[in-house]
């Protein structure tokens, strides 16, 4: 976060405190405001109307991800003022490091991975085609209002539960206990402060009140579409009474976990150390902590021997500071916990006389291991209190299945084959998680919780069937319904040099796919992607291709982009066609035009993908064969542009019906724009769900007036790897005003060439596109055109190299340029510049060796 953003965020938060007094009565956070009891009670009565108003607008997933990522950055920085403010609201004795742990869970990488695992996409709320070949659209929609009943023993559960509700697009009202601190309220205020749109604040309400306040509990549950309860059976029963019919009750209740050790494993000292880690971490307060250790044996002597060995391992562990076990042993402050610990141990000691148990315990009561010859699962009083029981694997299902509603994690230790076999058996018994011993509390982003995905419990799967004839080119229904609103870009403008070196330093987790640019305007630049980012971008390019008129059910495509040298075009469009399910001939651009044409004819391809310069060469080199074939119908091109005269040639001479841009993009940014059936030339729609576009002045870093040509500046949002904010891509363009006749809300822009196409020659600025337009419109030229700049002893020389054709007249073209381009005519008349026009074979024009692109301007001046 920039210094300016930090100051703005701090000022906003301070203003909120000032507005609401910051006094002791402001125990509640309601849609951006800290309020007291009286105001909260009044607003609760109008909760249904507040929910309806919030749901009337769509919450973009990117808004949630951006705000959470900014908050995560703040929480992981010990010196950040946000972290300092929140540390003041931690429960007494809580380590401030818990805020950094929370930050680690709120980063973009973790939340994006969670979205993909649980809902299948980083933008699950968009109504995209379920199958690209059908006009059926599916999405994950919010259930509406989620009421969260948070536990009182885990400071981070409440805010994480709200974030899950936000990721699913819901309005969220959360209850914390009357004894809780205001950590969740202030953390949500900080999160909302990182969202300039205000959408997050409108979807978050946090109330603090005791469960005895039943009227408030009824008011927050009555309009809910889902109620999430964290706690035991008593807590769930108390809330269930207020859950209306048809409302989804999501129980995150207490669970029991156990470790299971085979004979080889329990003999290993390393296994015992790992097991002690699981027991001591969090003092068994987590549902995934082992309460019972099962041994794969029926021999009671082995159980007693193991318990004694394990007791020695626990005895060597330092006591936890402020643990309940230690407090209880010292006559501590929690009589209920002390009583349960004492009672469980005393009963186990009494049963020693019957030969059923054997107890090993610390003199100060800080830990206890209770060996029991009976196999059924027994809950532990926790606080380093562990049962050890025999359970041969053949009896595992019969013994554990009666407790299946309460089972969670099984920590397994054994050989590879044992782990594979026992995992299946434990899952059949009702376990929902299997981990190695020593990692029972470890988790990963997007992991199912208690056997389900939380985001799916807070979502509905919805579908829309549309008329195939009317929606054939519509890939996403939302494009026709509303514009995408993304966080505004911030920070300085950046060019290729500003991002080239940082790309080399990305974390390995984010640098999984490497591409190099074609080098048509300079040295090839490295770009890196995570596979998740790449997948997101290929899906976006696929949607754009549908909009341009590609038919995955009927088109047969020859992929003729260049391949190799880490260049991404061929691979990318292979991936696009794979996601569309389209028929593909992966030929790539090769020098043997005859073989390529024969493959097109033999396999009856009717659609060509490729660079204009390569396709132009192929079609003219194999004109006789391809015209005789007569089956070509569509051309989708990228990387360069077909001129208007070239398009006319393709249609008149080869019978091609549609010639459209396959995408507008770059190696570093990915797909940026797409054409629809109503777009032509350089006009494209912005991929508005991925990028924000600005157009700045050619000479100054300020926005241009509407409709003026300027430098294109893109900010990529939906990317967890290489971050490219306010990136100068090197292209020129202008905004196309108004809504497109196709009905899409995505902004439109028209490409006006590259900054490198503008040359400073003989004190004048000359533009390659102007030469090309004059050659076509007044000179009748239909081929390619390249400009070469040389320095001579007398003056500079500008050579226009045009592709030779029967009607090419270099002298006529020279006259057209001099008469139609006043600045050029003046430079030549003043003897500042020599102008030469040459007709050459297309194959002799200079091209990028990587991508095959025509180099529009070759500057050979020294």
Image (tube, rainbow, N blue to C red):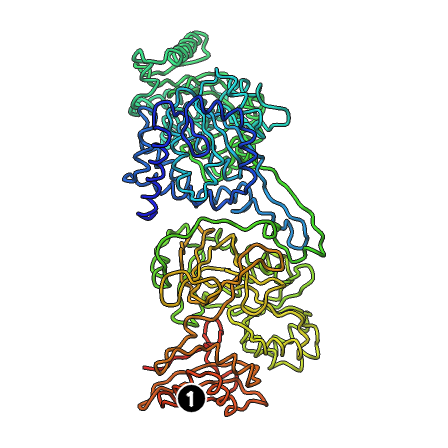
Q: Position of residue 583 (x, y in %)?
A: 65, 62
At 65% from the left and 44% from the top, the residue drawn is 463
Q: Residues within 10 Å of mark 1 (few under 14, many from 20)?
A: some
| Residue on which disc 1 sits | 835
Q: Position of residue 144 (x, y in %)?
A: 57, 34
In this rendered view, identify the residue nearer to me: 2 or 846.
2
Q: Position of residue 212 (x, y in %)?
A: 48, 15
In this rendered view, identify the residue nearer to me: 616 or 1.
1
Q: Would you place residue 753 above or below residue 514 in this image?
A: below
Q: Position of residue 560 (x, y in %)?
A: 57, 70
Q: Would you place residue 66 above or below residue 792 in this image?
A: above
At 55% from the left and 18% from the top, the residue drawn is 237
Q: Is residue 302 visible?
A: no
At 40% from the left and 32% from the top, the residue drawn is 438
Q: Is residue 23 left or right of residue 246?
A: left
Q: Is residue 643 visible?
A: yes
Residue 742 found in image quarter: bottom right
Q: Quadrant of the C terminus?
A: bottom left
Q: Which secondary structure lies at badge 1?
A: strand
């Amino acid at each position: 976060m920039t210094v300016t953003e930090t100051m703005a965020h701090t000022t906003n938060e301070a203003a909120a405190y000032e507005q609401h007094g910051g006094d002791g009565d402001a125990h509640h956070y309601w849609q951006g405001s800290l309020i007291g009891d009286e105001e909260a009670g009044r607003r609760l009565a109008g909760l249904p109307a507040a929910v309806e108003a919030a749901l009337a607008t769509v919450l973009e997933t990117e808004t949630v991800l951006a705000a959470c990522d900014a908050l995560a950055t703040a929480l992981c920085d010990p010196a950040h003022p946000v972290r300092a403010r929140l540390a003041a609201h931690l429960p007494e004795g809580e380590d401030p490091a818990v805020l950094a742990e929370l930050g680690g869970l709120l980063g973009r990488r973790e939340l994006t991975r969670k979205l993909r695992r649980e809902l299948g996409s980083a933008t699950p709320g968009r109504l995209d085609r379920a199958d690209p070949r059908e006009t059926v659209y599916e999405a994950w929609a919010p259930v509406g209002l989620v009421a969260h009943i948070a536990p009182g023993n885990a400071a981070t559960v409440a805010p994480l539960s709200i974030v899950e509700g936000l990721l699913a697009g819901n309005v969220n009202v959360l209850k914390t206990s009357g004894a809780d601190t205001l950590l969740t309220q202030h953390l949500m205020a900080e999160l909302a402060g990182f969202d300039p749109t205000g959408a997050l604040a409108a979807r978050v309400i946090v109330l603090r009140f005791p469960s005895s306040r039943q009227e408030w509990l009824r008011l927050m549950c009555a309009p809910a579409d889902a109620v999430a309860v964290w706690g035991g059976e008593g807590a769930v029963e108390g809330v269930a009474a207020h859950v209306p019919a048809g409302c989804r009750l999501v129980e995150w209740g207490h669970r029991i976990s156990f470790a299971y050790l085979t004979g080889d494993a329990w003999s290993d000292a390393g296994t015992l150390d790992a097991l002690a880690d699981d027991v001591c971490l969090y003092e068994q307060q987590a549902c995934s902590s082992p309460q019972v250790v099962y041994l794969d044996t029926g021999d009671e002597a082995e159980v007693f021997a193991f318990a004694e060995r394990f007791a020695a391992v626990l005895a060597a562990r330092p006591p936890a500071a402020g643990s309940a076990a230690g407090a209880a042993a010292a006559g501590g402050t929690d009589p209920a916990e002390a009583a349960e610990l004492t009672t469980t141990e005393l009963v186990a000691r009494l049963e020693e006389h019957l030969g059923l148990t054997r107890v090993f315990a610390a003199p100060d009561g800080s830990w206890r291991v209770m060996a029991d010859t009976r196999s059924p699962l027994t809950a532990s009083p926790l606080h380093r209190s562990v049962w050890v029981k025999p359970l041969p694997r053949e009896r595992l299902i019969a013994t554990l299945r009666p407790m299946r509603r309460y089972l969670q994690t099984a920590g397994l230790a054994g050989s590879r084959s044992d782990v594979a076999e026992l995992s299946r058996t434990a899952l059949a018994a009702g376990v929902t998680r299997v981990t190695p011993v020593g990692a029972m509390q470890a988790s990963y982003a997007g992991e199912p919780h208690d056997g389900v995905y939380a985001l799916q419990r807070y979502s509905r799967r919805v579908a829309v069937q549309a008329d195939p004839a009317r929606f054939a080119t519509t890939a996403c229904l939302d494009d026709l319904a509303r514009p995408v609103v993304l966080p505004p870009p911030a920070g300085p403008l950046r060019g290729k040099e500003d991002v080239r070196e940082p790309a080399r330093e990305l974390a390995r987790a984010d640098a999984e796919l490497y591409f190099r640019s074609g080098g048509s305007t300079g040295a090839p630049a490295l770009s890196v992607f995570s596979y998740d980012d790449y997948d997101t971008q290929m899906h976006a390019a696929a949607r754009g291709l549908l909009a341009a008129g590609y038919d995955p059910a009927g088109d047969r495509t020859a992929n003729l982009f260049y391949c190799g040298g880490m260049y991404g075009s061929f691979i990318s469009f292979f991936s696009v066609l794979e996601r569309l399910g389209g028929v593909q001939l992966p030929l790539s651009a090769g020098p043997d035009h005859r073989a390529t044409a024969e493959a097109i004819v033999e396999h009856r391809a009717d659609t060509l993908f490729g660079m204009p310069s390569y396709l132009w060469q192929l079609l003219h080199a194999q004109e006789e064969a391809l015209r005789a074939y007569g089956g070509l119908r569509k051309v989708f091109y990228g990387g360069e542009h077909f001129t208007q005269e070239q398009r006319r040639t393709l249609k008149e001479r080869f019978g091609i019906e549609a010639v459209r841009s396959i995408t507008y993009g770059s190696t570093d940014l990915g797909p940026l724009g797409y054409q629809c059936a109503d777009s032509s030339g350089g006009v494209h729609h912005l991929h508005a769900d991925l990028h924000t576009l600005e157009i700045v002045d050619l000479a100054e870093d300020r926005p241009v007036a509407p409709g003026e040509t300027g430098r294109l500046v893109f900010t990529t949002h939906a990317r967890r790897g290489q971050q490219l904010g306010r990136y100068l891509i090197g292209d020129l363009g202008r905004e196309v005003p108004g809504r497109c006749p196709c009905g899409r809300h995505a902004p439109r822009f028209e490409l006006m060439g590259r900054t490198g196409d503008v040359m400073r020659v003989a004190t004048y600025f000359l533009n390659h596109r102007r030469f090309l337009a004059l050659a076509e419109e007044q000179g009748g030229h239909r081929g390619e055109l390249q400009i070469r700049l040389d320095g001579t002893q007398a003056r500079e020389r500008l050579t226009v190299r045009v592709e030779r054709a029967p009607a090419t007249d270099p002298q006529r073209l020279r006259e057209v340029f001099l008469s139609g381009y006043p600045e050029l005519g003046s430079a030549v008349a003043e003897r500042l510049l020599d102008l030469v026009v040459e007709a050459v074979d297309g194959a002799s024009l200079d091209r990028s060796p990587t991508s095959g692109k025509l180099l529009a301007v070759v500057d050979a001046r020294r």
